[in-house]
Image (cartoon, rainbow, N blue to C red):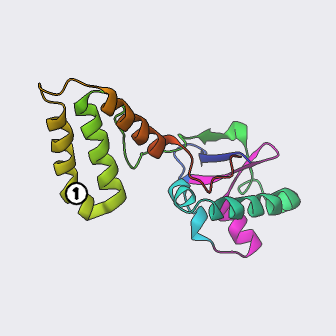
Amino acid sequence: MKLLNFQSGSGGISLFGVVIKGHAVSFKTLLQKSGQTRGKLSDVYSYLENLPSSEDAARELLKYGEANISSLNAEEKITLEKVRILAPISTPRALIDFGLSPRHLGNSAATLIKHEFGIFGSIIAPIVKKRISAAAGSSHRSTAGFLEMARAIAIRCCSPPESWAGK
């Protein structure tokens, strides 16, 4: 399954869809044609937030699209040569700083806490950032703890979730 964000024509609206037999087909079109309504596939952010169920929904629509590609008109199935393929994620929700210096670790921890805990995270993030920076003061020269913390942060942020099928 090849997912893509794309625009049809010049300056068209951004669509989230799938490649079917050399054509870009939006999930919006597939949902309408199949008579379904699923908010999980309205855009790439909805797709990512609703994994793994959104992947199942996308695969189901892909099967429908493959079986019914001939019934779609030229505006509903656009050859890949005529579309502008956009970045997979145009605006990342959070940027994580992965340096190993205390400042980088503090920034990464603060960003994670804000992202995971919302308004409560905004309150405690500065405290965590300050504690990490304080632990790295002139009297604390060991980096072993920081390496372990960085590894834990990297695993938490970059590894696929346990429910991810690995496909």
From where the camera sits, is residue 59 visible? yes
State the extent of the magenta-drawn residues as a range: 15-37
Where is residue 136 shown, x and y percent of the image?
Answer: 18, 31
Residue 38: within the magenta?
A: no
Residue at (69% x, 64% y) in the render? 57
The image shows residue 148, relative to residue 125, as above or below, that is: above
From where the camera sits, is residue 99 visible? no
Of residues 16 and 51, which is closer to you in this image? Answer: 51
- How many C-alpha atoms fall within 10 Å of the one at disc 1: few (<14), some, or many (≥20)? some
Of residues 137 and 6, which is closer to you in this image? Answer: 137
Residue at (71% x, 36% y) in the render? 81
Of residues 80 and 60, which is closer to you in this image? Answer: 60
Where is residue 55 shown, x and y percent of the image?
Answer: 67, 58
The image shows residue 41, relative to residue 9, as above or below, that is: below
Residue at (71% x, 55% y) in the render? 75
Disc 1 marks a residue whose amino acid type is Ser
Where is residue 35 shown, x and y percent of the image?
Answer: 73, 76
Where is residue 87 shown, x and y percent of the image?
Answer: 53, 40
Residue 36: within the magenta?
A: yes
Q: Give the image quarter of residue 148.
A: top left
Q: Is residue 121 left or right of residue 23?
A: left
Judging by the rendered image, the residue that carries numbered circle 1 is 122
